[in-house]
Image (spheres, grey):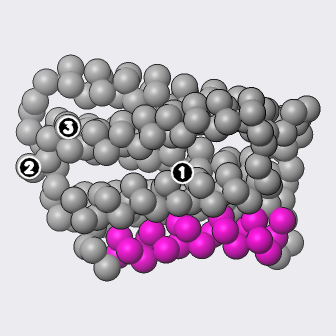
Amino acid sequence: MKIKQAYIQLISDAIIPLAGALFFNWSLYFILIFYCIDLLALEVVLHLKSRKTIEFRGINRKEWRQRGLKSAVLFLLSLLLIHFCVFFIQPGIDFQKELVEFMAYEEMGIQQGYILVPLIAFAAYQLYRMTFLMPARFRTITMDEIWNPHLISLLIVIAFSGIVIGLSQLLVFHELVYILGIVGFSSAYQIWRIVK
């Protein structure tokens, strides 16, 4: 991805949750569901990248399976810890009710469950096409280059979740503080990846 596109993506990734929290009264869990769906879409795209790379270069699938399994375990652990965080921040939260409300949330008269999930999947696939297939990155990329940034981001999510769980035993901040922390850490990691 070109640097200018990366910064535009970074800004939009930061503006959407902040605007949602400040102007549309989105809860912390509501915003975290967005992030989790986005992480799941990325997980799928990484498998598409791995498959295309292996098909083109005829390399062993063992690396793909190992990294895919490691990523799946870290992804599931991330989801679990995110839910523990929200539970400690908002004791008594009904996750099922919140998820149904998320999918039924209407913007301009359309329930977002019908639009958002396919839109995230489409956007992830388009990004895969534009940044991986069209420039033929599968010809030279390694499995480390495909998986390591995602594995690092999952480890950051796990570490951040652990810190939040620990802090929530002592004191609980306003939801906006957590949202700012998520956006801040996410943006800092993306900037680090851009300039690296």
Q: Tell me the SS state at disc 2.
A: loop
Q: Secondary structure at mark 1?
A: helix
Residue 38 is labelled as: 1
What residue is pinned by disc 3? Answer: 144
Q: CA distance from mark 3 to mark 2?
A: 12 Å
Q: Can I make out residue 112 in this image?
A: no
Distance from label 2 to label 1 (Cα)? 26 Å
* Amino acid type of the residue that numbered disc 1 sits on in the rendered structure: Asp
Q: Residue at x 84, y 54 (%)?
A: 104
Q: Would you say residue 111 sits in the magenta stretch?
A: no
Secondary structure found at label 3: helix
**Residue at x-position 77% and y-position 71%:** 22
Residue 2 % position (x, y)? 25, 73
In the image, what residue occupies the spot 36% across and 36% down?
Answer: 151
Q: Nearer the viewer, residue 120 or 189?
A: 189
Q: Nearer the viewer, residue 100 or 134?
A: 100
